[in-house]
Amino acid sequence: MTIPAMRQPPLTLTEAAAYTNLSGRFLRREIQRHRLSVVRLGRTLRFDARDLDAYLASNRVPMQAESP
């Protein structure tokens, strides 16, 4: 039997904003545009840190090599 890995508790909007260094307003806009996963518990929003990491990774712009 395997022991499940410790899961981080879901983040609030304020915590998610601090975690991503983005504003809460921006995160709400991304949720409305269906670009960011969220768990809705009534009017409360909760975020999984893994979803936030995936969102940030999917929006990464690769560096371009400098031209001589």
Image: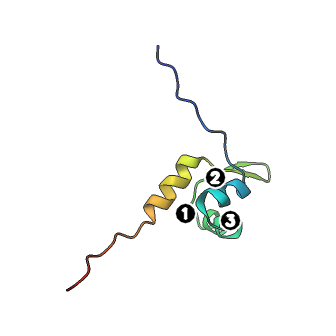
What residue would you read off at disc 3? 28
Q: Residue at x 72, y 51 (%)?
A: 12
Instruction: Label 2: state its secondary structure.
Output: loop
- Kind of residue indicated by mark 3: Arg
Q: CA distance from mark 2 to mark 1?
A: 10 Å
Q: CA distance from mark 3 to mark 1?
A: 10 Å
Q: Residue at x 79, y 49 (%)?
A: 42
Instruction: Label 1: state its secondary structure.
Output: loop
Q: CA distance from mark 3 to mark 2?
A: 10 Å
Query: Which label belongs to residue 63?
Result: none
In the image, residue 2 lies at what x, y percent?
47, 18
In the image, residue 3 lies at what x, y percent?
51, 20
Left/right placement of residue 10 relative to residue 6 reads: right
- Kind of residue indicated by mark 2: Val
The colour scheme of the drawn protein is: rainbow
| Residue 30 found in image quarter | bottom right
Discs 2, 1 touching: Cβ within 8 Å: no
- Looking at the image, the residue that sits furthest to the left is 68
Q: Earlier in the sequence, mark 3 or mark 2?
A: 3
Q: Nearer the viewer, residue 13 or 65?
A: 65
Query: Which label belongs to residue 38?
Result: 2
Q: Earlier in the sequence, mark 3 or mark 1?
A: 3
What residue would you read off at disc 1? 35
In the image, residue 44 lies at what x, y percent?
77, 51
- Looking at the image, the residue that sits furthest to the bottom is 68
- Kind of residue indicated by mark 1: Arg
In the image, residue 43 lies at what x, y percent?
79, 53
Q: Residue at x 22, y 84 (%)?
A: 67
